[in-house]
Image (cartoon, rainbow, N blue to C red):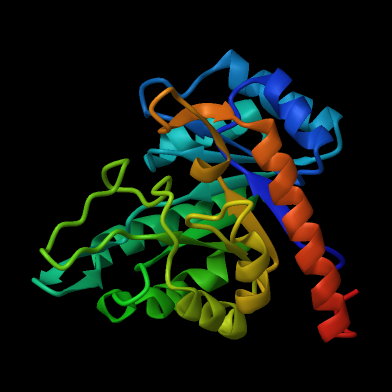
Amino acid sequence: MKKVLIQIYEIQTPDEAASIIALGVDHIGSVLLSNEEWKSQSIKDTIETVHENGAKSSLITLFNDQNTVFRALDYYRPDMVHFCEMLVKEKDRRSYEYDPEMMKHLIDLQVNIREKFSQINIIRSIPIAPPGFSERIPSLQMAGFFEPVSDFFLTDTFMIFDKNVDEQPVEGFVGITGKTCDWNIASRLVENSRIPVILAGGISPENAYEGILKVRPAGVDSCTLTNAQNNFGAPVRFKKDPEKVKRLVAAVRNAEKNMKKLNPNFK
């Protein structure tokens, strides 16, 4: 690995893609929000702009119907497709277990994507609980099932609270919480995985340096905490703050330099 990859999500327009790439971002992620509205000229133009500017495109589909996924991949031709389903179901009041039916469907989908679209890499999000709750989710066990049919893992935060409430911003999916996952579990995933792991979940310009040195991932991913903010200080979806992205890139490159000092094999 020559560098720590930087991935920024929810880029939906070609102009914003070009400006974010110019700041030093490697992977540009776009999102298809529904099975019914999978076709977007703006996102197609965005992916083409990413390719023209020498970066890699990633596409999240917030649906997993195979026929629609295939149509979308054939239409957009991204470098990567990213799946971020929640994967787990409630076991009891204090823990969760993986959903075998959902897992089988998604593993079969990834197998079929590899057969039909061999040039497209697959990113699989692995849900990890916030610090203090990690024992409640079988994160590493789920990763073991998906590793043979994935090209990247991405950690993301599965929200758990003591009062048995799990509220994800997008029902059925992990992501855009702005909260960090348990970096100890993320670090174990990096150590145990034979495929690259991207650290996500509450990554910001302020904590990217620490997260990289703690977890030693192949890359970092940021969405919510590099978004612009509204007048009330809340993040605005699908709109980046270029200054935050610039500071994130600087933090990652600084961490990268220190990783090279600590590990001569990191080149």
Q: Is residue 237 visible?
A: yes
In the rendered view, would you say 205 is above or below 195? above
In the rendered view, would you say 109 is above or below 239? below
The residue that appears at 37% across and 39% down in the rendered structure is 65
Q: In the image, 93: left or right of 138?
A: left
Q: Position of residue 167 (x, y in %)?
A: 23, 50
Query: How many labels, in total?
Result: 0
Q: Is residue 114 visible?
A: no
Q: In the image, 2: left or right of 251?
A: right
In the rendered view, would you say 125 is above or below 36? below
Q: In the image, 207: left or right of 156?
A: right
The residue that appears at 60% across and 31% down in the rendered structure is 240
Q: In the image, 235: left or right of 148?
A: left
| Front position in the image: 216 or 103 | 216
Quarter in which the C terminus is drawn: bottom right
In the rendered view, would you say 179 is above or below 148? above
Q: Position of residue 225 (x, y in %)?
A: 52, 44
Q: Quadrant of residue 219?
A: bottom right
Quarter in which the N terminus is drawn: bottom right
The residue that appears at 40% across and 38% down in the rendered structure is 62
| Front position in the image: 54 or 159 | 159
Q: Position of residue 147 (x, y in %)?
A: 54, 72
Residue occupying the far top of the picture: 41
| Front position in the image: 1 or 230 | 230
Q: Position of residue 42 (x, y in %)?
A: 61, 16
